[in-house]
Image (spheres, helix red, strand yellow):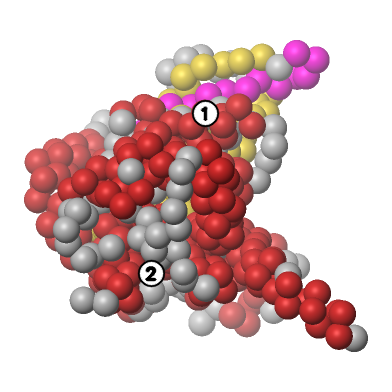
Amino acid sequence: MRPVVWNILRFIILIPFQALVIHKIEFGDYSSYFNGFLYILFILMLPYETPKWLTLTLAFALGISLDIFSGTIGMHASACVLIAFARPRVMKILASNDEYEFRNKPTIHVMGFRWYISYAFLLCVLHHFWFFLVEDFRFTEIHIILLKTLGSAVFTTFLIVLTQYLFFSRKKENG
Amino acid sequence: MQRIIALLKRYSNFLYFLVLQALCFIFIIGNNNYQHAKFWNSSSAVVGWLNEMNTNVSDYFYLGQANEDLVDENALLKEKLFGPDSVAYLQWKTEIDSSRRLKFEYLSARVINSSTKFEKNYLTIDIGTAAGVNPDELMGVVGPKGVVGYTKVGSSSNYTEVVSMLHSNFTLGTMHEKSGQSGTMNWTSSDDRYTATIIEFPTYTDVFVGDTIVTNGSSGLFPRGELVGTVQEIEPITGKTTNRITVKLATDFNRVHHVHVIRNNQLLQLRQLEAGKDNVIKQIP
């Protein structure tokens, strides 16, 4: 199937999965420090050649869809648009560190474990930091925001890498 | 001119990014003001339906717990009704007004979605305007154990979004049951999901750990005396004649499955009276 179809499918599956499953994962009293936001995998997996305006529009649509579920209208959208904007830059920064070819599919199998985990973690940190900052709307609690960002980014990166190995095989076309 | 166009073209993506961010922030700020939240909430039909499907499955796992809570609540109500103090009579006197109309009505509802781990937490319940929820006014919501929150304006015909007590904008008029001293309760950033704080409580009132905190009924959303929680910690504030009281909430927000929405049939009168309008008399049927 064509990549467009896979991307649409991912969008449709990730939003309810995030809202109905991932949001309900609890770690007892420390739940607020480990929020998984697996849904940003959609932005991470957009083909490299997607036009920037389209990436931004899709990120906005993705964020708003989740916002409607969780009653946080605008917050997820804002964070998503931010990482959609930052994605090409993050890719460029990583390119200078590694031997790196522009390939169309940013998956763990195509790009390698090390590249992918730094790519995912950087964007997670950016997304989560922005989200928690906007959610809190004050700068007085910055240490709590940073702790939340770190804990949640580790958890989200884990979920993303896990999803990569579980659902995206080396051979299948579903990238 | 050509230069300007070239410049715009070069930064078109950045400009588009800024436009989208601005849009997001208009939504965010609009959502904080509950008047504008009408169209954007999880009570919309599709999302409500999806959440309900989800709850239809997960409800079975909590049947035991929900049953236990309801049995406890029944026991408490019976105690109140037939107990030695015959609270039922007192309640009847205070809650039924002179025109013999019921002042507070309780609409029962099921919680189909809830969160507890964010700064702003909400619940979605499965009744809406069709069942008597007023989409233009806030309404109090109580669970089997105590106060849960209040409805957001703009419920759809079958779903309503509820602002949980675990919400950074939440405010509730509360009262120390023993002394009758009022205090405003908030969910501050130092609170976790089990507590809330009365920030300024006068030191001249004797408060002890374990004392009961109830609603004071000032907003008209709740009747006077709905259970809120118990005093967990009393912290004097230096240089002020007030204490900071941490309240252990009676409701466990991870286990709220059935709630009641409180309809105050005299809210309109209260609002008009408070707004200083003098046509209140005409409104009484």
In the rendered structure, does residue A119 fall within the stretch colored magenta? no
At mark 1, the secondary structure is: helix
Q: Chain of mark 1?
A: A
At mark 2, the secondary structure is: loop
Residue at 59% x, 80% y is B283
Magenta segment, which residues?
B238-250
State whether residue B190 appears in this view. yes
- Between residues B187 and B49, which one lies in front from this camera angle? B49
- Between residues B236 and B222, which one lies in front from this camera angle? B236
Q: Residue A6 vs residue A98: left or right?
A: left
Residue at 12% x, 57% y is B57
Vertical placement of residue B236 versus B252, above or below: above
Residue at 56% x, 31% y is A146
Q: Where is residue B5? Give x, y as percent.
A: 81, 82
State whether residue B152 appears in this view. no
Q: Contact (CB < 8 A) between labels 1 and 2?
A: no
Q: Amino acid at mark 1?
A: Leu
Outermost residue toward the right in this view: B1
Overall secondary structure of the magenta stretch? strand
Quarter of image, res B226? top left
- Residue that label 1 marks: A147
- Residue that label 2 marks: B43
- Local packing at callout 1 (Cα closer than 10 Å; few below 14, some 14-19, many 20+) is some
In the rendered structure, does residue B248 fall within the stretch colored magenta? yes
Q: Where is residue B35? Give x, y as percent.
A: 61, 69
Residue at 38% x, 74% y is B44
Q: Amino acid at mark 2?
A: Ser
